[in-house]
Every structure is written in structure tokens, then in C-alpha cells.
Image: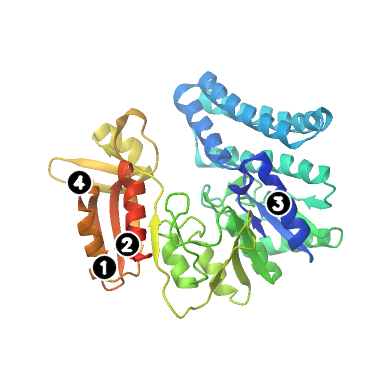
Amino acid sequence: MKISGAVLNKPQNFSFLFDIITKHCTSPTIFVFSAFSDLSRKLRQSARIARSEGLDPAMQYFANVKQQLYELVKSLFATDELANSVNFKLNVLFESFEKILFGIAITKELTKRTLDRVLSFGEYFSSIVLEEFLKSKCIDAIFLDSSKLIITDTNYGNAKPILDRTAEAINRNLLPHLEKSNLVFLPGFIGSSEIGTITTMGFESSNLTALLIASILKADSVTFWTDVEGIRTSDPKIVENTQLVPEVSFDDALLASHNGIKLVHPSMYEFFVSNPNIKYIYKSAFSPDNGETQIVPKTNQKPKFVLISEPYYFIELNDEKEKDYLQEGIMYYTSKDYSFLLTEEFPNNEINKEVNVLTLFYFEPYDVFEALNQISSKVRFVISNVRQKIYKILVEEDYLIEVANFLHNFLILKNK
């Protein structure tokens, strides 16, 4: 099982994890968890501030992160004694993290290797809190360090597991624990190289950890517990009246993962096709009986989606900025007298426009263009692949909710 960091973003939500364990873990179960909520992104921002602005601003920013964790601990644990015990363990890690910030501030460098070390603290902070929470609920669970199990190459930021070494480590260091306890917990996202340095497998890659272990141990199923009820026809946090998609084929899951669906990572595809007999299930931790989605080898019909990307930002480029931004760019356009970058990285005061890419899947061309004709003033750019029935639309942030809801209503709910 994999529990999303978006589930464990509030103290009251930890009770849902307790319910999952007590109701759905009747056989030996390995739980992979993500860093809480947006913790990893905040740690990354701390490191970037240390590099660009120096130690004091970075420490001030990180102080807010620490305070949020202290408040979480205070809410989760019934007594001051328990909370103080958890905070003591956190403080040891906080000191280690602050030493890394100091090094970044002194050198003015943030290498990929150092950034992986920075990001790994999100999983380690979360692990301390989660382990102590389960102990306080008398849940007999063993917590392991994924960096001792997932052995990768040294492509920091997007490391690939070395399968034979990882299988050896899992069989030696994980399997024996399932004989002692019905539950084993470990963080996703992180691993270590053969020389022992911390690596990460890419943002949102905790699912890969679950799939990798399931593949090696030939698990019966992998259940992804998220904050939404299965995979929906659009993002239910933005679009109203989304519908459950009961089944998605391996190929369609891969295509959707490249176009904005947030529950499937592109690298998951190879695990799906290599292990077609494992059940891959998406369920809501908040309402586990309200439907689920299964990722299956093939389906009888194509799922219809209105997918929404994370925000991108336009930046006008000159020679000086190109050096800083080109590596982080998603799309780079040039004309005779104008160049700009479309990037996921927030560009401080240099922002021109904030946009999202909407991708429409498997709709008839006539319906799409009829819909776009009605909302053309809110749409800035369209790419269509009529043969594959896939369409991409650039929408400014101010119009995102309106356009996404209109297209979903028009194309999926058929309210014209």
C-alpha cells in the first residue's frame, strides 16, 4: 500500500490511516508513505534561499517549516511528554538540516547531489512523526529506511534503481521483518547510491518505491490511498461534478501521466507492463467505499479526461537570463525579435503570465471545437491531434477554473 502525503496534511487526517490499517491490512502489508503535504517543496525552497540570499533568510524560512511540524506534533499527541519526545527526535534532524543550509550559503552552490540530501529530510521528518503516532495508537509497525533498501545509480534528482542490488537488499533487510510484524512502513522517493550517498528518484516518485517493492516480492496488489475517490475525469479540487473512471489501461495511464494527471507517474508504466498480474488500485483514504479505479492491461473503451497541468510561468529572456533559466524550462520559443521560456519554477518579479495547460482526451473533434468556439476569448493557444483525439489548450490562470469547468461540463456531462 502507498499512502499519499496529501492525505497526511492535517492532524485529523491521521485517523484515516489508522482506519485503513485496522480494516484493510489483514495480511502482511508493506506501507510506503510520502513526505507530508508540501514539505519537500518547502525544504527545496529553503535550500534555494540559502544559495541566493544567504543563511539568515534561509533559516527564517526554515523556522516556519519547523513551527508547522511542531504544531502538527502538538495536535497529534495527547500529552506534553509524548510531544516533547517526538520534538526531541525532530530537533536532532533539524540541526543536521541547518548544517546543510549553512554549507549551501557559504559555497553559494546547490548541486543535484546536495539537493537530493535536502529533499530526503522531508521523508525523515515525516517518518519520525508517523512512527510515534502509530506507537501511541498501539499499532505494531516496523519502520525501515528506504535508503538502505533501494540501491540506485548516481543520477541525482532522477536516480534509477539497480534492480539486482535492490532485490538483494529487500530480501535481506525487509522480508525478515514481515515475520515479526504484519506491518512494515518505509518512506518512498529516496534511495542511496552504491557509494552510500542519498539519491531521489524524482518528484512524485514515491509510487515507484511501492511498485518496485511489489515487483520484487510479487505482491498480490498495490493500493494507492489518495485524497480523491479513484481517478476522476478531471481534478476534483478544481472541477465540479467529476466522474469516477473505473478502469484505465496501462497505455492510457502512461499517456495521461505525461499530460497532467497527478496520480500516475510516467515511470510507473514499466512496472505495470512487467507485472500485469498485480492489481493496481486507487482509492480514497477519506471514503474507501465510494468507488475505486484499477489500472489494467487493456480496457474496452477509452477514458475521457480534462487534465490540468501544474502552473507554468512565462519569462521574457535575454542573454543573461537564458543562462539561469534554460535548464529548468519546459518549452522554449524564439522568434526574430522575441524569446520566452515556459517554466515550472516561479520566477519572482520577472513573471509575465501564469498559465496552465489543459489536455482533452478522446473527444470528437467537432465537440471540442464547438466547445472552444463558445469560450474562445479565454483560450490562448490550441494544439490538436485529431487522429488521436487529443487537444492541448493554454489558459491563463485567471480563467482556469471557468474554462476547466466549462469544458468538463460541455464535453463529459453533455450540458451544452
Q: Which residue is mark 1?
A: 367
**142 versus 253 height, above or below:** above
Q: Nearer the viewer, residue 408 or 43?
A: 408
Q: Position of residue 208 (x, y in %)?
A: 58, 59
Amino acid type for the residue under numbered disc 2: Phe
Disc 4 to disc 2: CB gap under 8 Å:
no
**278 versus 109 height, above or below:** below
Q: Is residue 148 visible?
A: no
Amino acid type for the residue under numbered disc 4: Thr
| Mark number, residue 334 | 4
| N-term mark: 2 or 3 | 3
Q: Which residue is mark 2?
A: 410
Disc 1 to disc 2: CB gap under 8 Å:
yes
| N-term mark: 3 or 1 | 3
Q: Position of residue 336 (x, y in %)?
A: 12, 44
Q: Residue 391 lies in what quarter of the image?
A: bottom left
Q: CA distance from mark 2 to mark 3?
A: 37 Å
Q: Which residue appears farthest toward the left when viewing the image?
A: 336
Q: Which residue is mark 3?
A: 17
Q: CA distance from mark 1 to mark 2?
A: 8 Å
Q: Nearer the viewer, residue 138 or 88?
A: 138
Disc 3 to disc 1: CB gap under 8 Å:
no
Classify the position of the N terminus by image quarter.
Answer: bottom right
**Under tag 1, what secondary structure?**
helix
Mark 4 vs mark 2: in front: 2
Q: Residue at x 58, y 52 (%)?
A: 227
Q: CA distance from mark 3 to mark 4?
A: 49 Å
